[in-house]
């Protein structure tokens, strides 16, 4: 047995040496073959003075990719998504279900509702800015200016003047005389603040009936001497039943959509 173990150790060492020595013989031809067939790479730099149109097109493509990378932030700040997702989370907390519906379901529903609500604005942007630009009837700057019109109208409609004044004070700008004097960079954060306030107001109204139900259940349990039983656990089925009986999803989604009309 001892001789067999010694023989196995010697054989394993010899096999390892043979394998290490054979690796260069295997990979060297592959490296040489790859080096012979590798294409040559050349880099050319030009000032762009000879073909300014191509340079402008490249800059427009770069700007487009930049906008696409910021698409999630744009959806959160200049659409109805903020108010909808806030109300959904308040509803879930008011009912008492921790992870039901899941965040993915709420986010997906909020996105589809945002698409429906923003469809008139998107149609105006498409008719007045995008299609003329694609047909080369207007330039890039003119298309951007036309696209801001419907979007700014939507933002002004749902933004409080008090919030706009706050951001004018923060930026150190003079008080505007007309809506055209309000920069878009000031209008967007003011709109977000207004949406946060509106979402919290709706969330407060959603909390009231469920809070009353919790208080009633807690009073009943206290009168029955069942103080060790958590009232939230007992009231949860009744809150779910109440929400289903009044068709809560239909009422809430309809109210949210009508709040943007």
Image: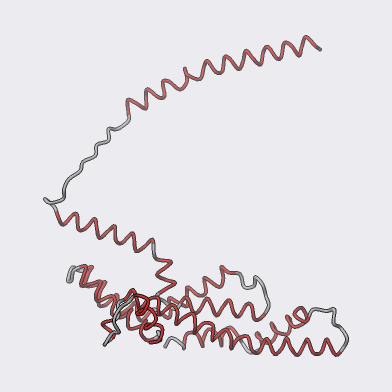
How far across and down, in percent of the image, does residue 6 sit?
A: 74, 11
The residue most toward the right is 225
Colour option used: secondary structure
When the figure is inspected, residue 49 is found, relative to residue 172, above or below; the finding is above
Residue beneath the point at 40% across and 79% down: 190
Location of the C terminus (image quadrant):
bottom left
Tell me the residue at 18%/71% (across/down).
138
Q: Quadrant of residue 93?
A: bottom right
Could you tell me residue 221's position as x and y percent? Answer: 83, 86
Picture coordinates of residue 112 (x, y %)?
A: 47, 74
Which quarter of the rendered picture does the N terminus lie within?
top right
Q: What is the quadrant of residue 130 in the picture?
A: bottom left
Q: Nearer the viewer, residue 94 or 103?
A: 94
Q: Residue furthest left?
A: 50
* 178 sits left or right of 19 in the view: left
| Residue drawn at x 34%, y 60% as measured from the top left | 66
Q: In the image shown, does 216 or 119 lie closer to the viewer?
A: 216
Q: How many marks?
A: 0
Does residue 147 appear left or right of residue 1 in this picture? left
């Amino acid at each position: 047995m001892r001789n067999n173990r010694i023989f196995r150790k010697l054989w394993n060492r010899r096999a390892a040496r043979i394998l290490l020595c054979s690796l260069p013989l295997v990979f060297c031809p592959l490296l040489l073959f790859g080096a012979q067939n590798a294409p040559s790479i050349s880099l050319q730099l030009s000032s762009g003075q000879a073909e300014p149109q191509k340079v402008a097109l490249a800059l427009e493509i770069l700007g487009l990719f930049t906008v696409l990378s910021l698409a999630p932030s744009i959806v959160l700040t200049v659409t109805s998504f903020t108010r909808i997702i806030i109300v959904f989370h308040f509803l879930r907390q008011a009912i008492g279900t921790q992870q039901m519906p899941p965040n993915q379901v709420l986010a997906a529903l909020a996105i589809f509702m945002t698409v429906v609500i923003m469809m008139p604005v998107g149609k105006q942007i498409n008719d007045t800015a995008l299609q003329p630009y694609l047909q080369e009837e207007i330039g890039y700057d003119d298309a951007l200016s036309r696209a801001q019109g419907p979007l700014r109208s939507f933002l002004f409609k749902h933004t409080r003047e008090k919030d706009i004044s706050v951001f004018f004070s923060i930026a150190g700008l003079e008080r505007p005389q007309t809506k055209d004097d309000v920069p878009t960079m000031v209008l967007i954060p003011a709109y977000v603040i207004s949406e946060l306030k509106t979402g919290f107001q709706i969330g407060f109204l959603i909390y009231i009936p469920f809070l009353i139900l919790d208080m009633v259940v807690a009073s009943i349990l206290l009168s029955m001497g069942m103080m060790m039983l958590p009232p939230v656990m007992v009231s949860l089925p009744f809150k779910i039943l109440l929400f289903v009986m009044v068709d809560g999803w239909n009422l809430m989604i309809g109210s949210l959509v009508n709040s943007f009309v």
